[in-house]
Amino acid sequence: MADPVDWVYTELDTASHKGYEVWHRVYDQKVVKWLSDNPRVTQEQFLSYMRDLYKIQELDKRFPQAWKQTTDGYRGVGMNKFYVIEPADGKMFGTKWAYAEPLEPSNIGKSQKCPVCGGAVSLRRWLPPHRIKLSSAKPSKWGDFVWGAGFPLLVSSKFKEIYDQERLTGIEEFSFPVEIVRIGTLKSGQFPLPPPTYHLIHVLWGGANQDDIASDLTHEHPEVITCAFCRVGVTWRKQERVIIEESSWNGSDIFKPRNAPVHFMVSERFKRLVENNHMSNIWLIPAEQFAYDERRLALW
Ligand SMILES: [Zn+2]
């Protein structure tokens, strides 16, 4: 694998020949930081990140709102539409769709840390080998998205192909196919049909910042929130909606915003591809309708 820093300079050099010198000077630091946060990035992920940086930062500056209206149709001036994703019907452990359980051995790595206070902002990472049990042996229950506790999300190879082909961004890593060791009460070798190939995905925390005021966020114990950057703390929180601070979004199609009480958020483009390809076991909730109350979690 080439040294990521080489890619930066190769890419910046190419970029400057195309006349993006200003962009080059302003954003090289940002790119280096992104690479240090994403040490295992592939060349394709990196190039995709660079394209998005250019698309968002430079086009917005030169032609305000232009790309938003031309790449995806009109979305309203200054307003990107985002969606919170959840399992279908909000049921992670339902009977309609199979869910997954991680099996031994459990190799657990580090959590992501807030760059300001150093506190943990994600669960600790589940490292290979990724061995799982699926809850149902009925092929009709094997969705494109498989949810569960103790891991971020599993996606089908069909999703991965579309993600790669459409050059969606935001997934830091697709794992090698997870090993499905059991399905319901059946062991490997007894499965009625081979299950789909699933990959574990990792999405880095950050990528956008929640606008707490616009989201109407209140805390029962605001005093426990001591870091203004991550705002992590055990407090009863309640909010009416999830509004992203527009300028904070890094352009990723799937992301985990700072201080939003969600697993993941996705772009309009992500939503459209999921819908057009009839991918199953995902619920796309317009972020402005995603109300959250820690005392009434059953709401979602
Ligand atoms: Zn912090």
Image: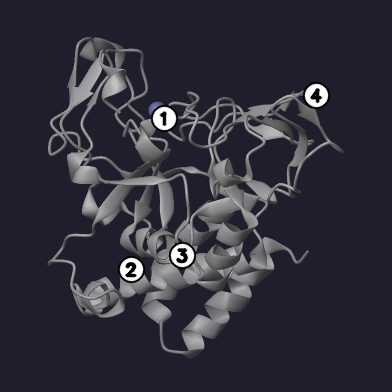
- Label 1: which secondary element: loop
Depth check: give the residue in front, 82 or 118. 82
Q: Counting other residues with Cα less than 10 Å from the Cα at mark 1, is it few (<14), some (14-19), or many (20 or more)?
A: some
Residue 10, image x and y in percent? 62, 77
* Tag 2 and tag 1, C-beta contact below 8 Å: no
Quick one: which residue is furthest to the bottom in this view? 18
> As shown in the figure, which amino acid type bears the numbered disc 4?
Pro
Decide if residue 46 is in sight here.
no
Report the image quarter containing ligand 1: top left
- Label 4: which secondary element: loop
- In primary-sequence order, the first of circles 2 and 1 is 2
- Label 2: which secondary element: helix
Instruction: State which mark lies toward you, 3 or 2.
Output: 3
Whether the residue under disc 1 has CB within 8 Å of ligand 1:
no
- In primary-sequence order, the first of circles 3 and 1 is 1
- In primary-sequence order, the first of circles 3 and 2 is 2
Residue 277 tag number: 3
Q: Can you say which quadrant of the picture contains the C terminus?
A: top left
> As shown in the figure, which amino acid type bears the numbered disc 3?
Asn
- In primary-sequence order, the first of circles 4 and 3 is 4
Residue corresponding to mark 2: 56
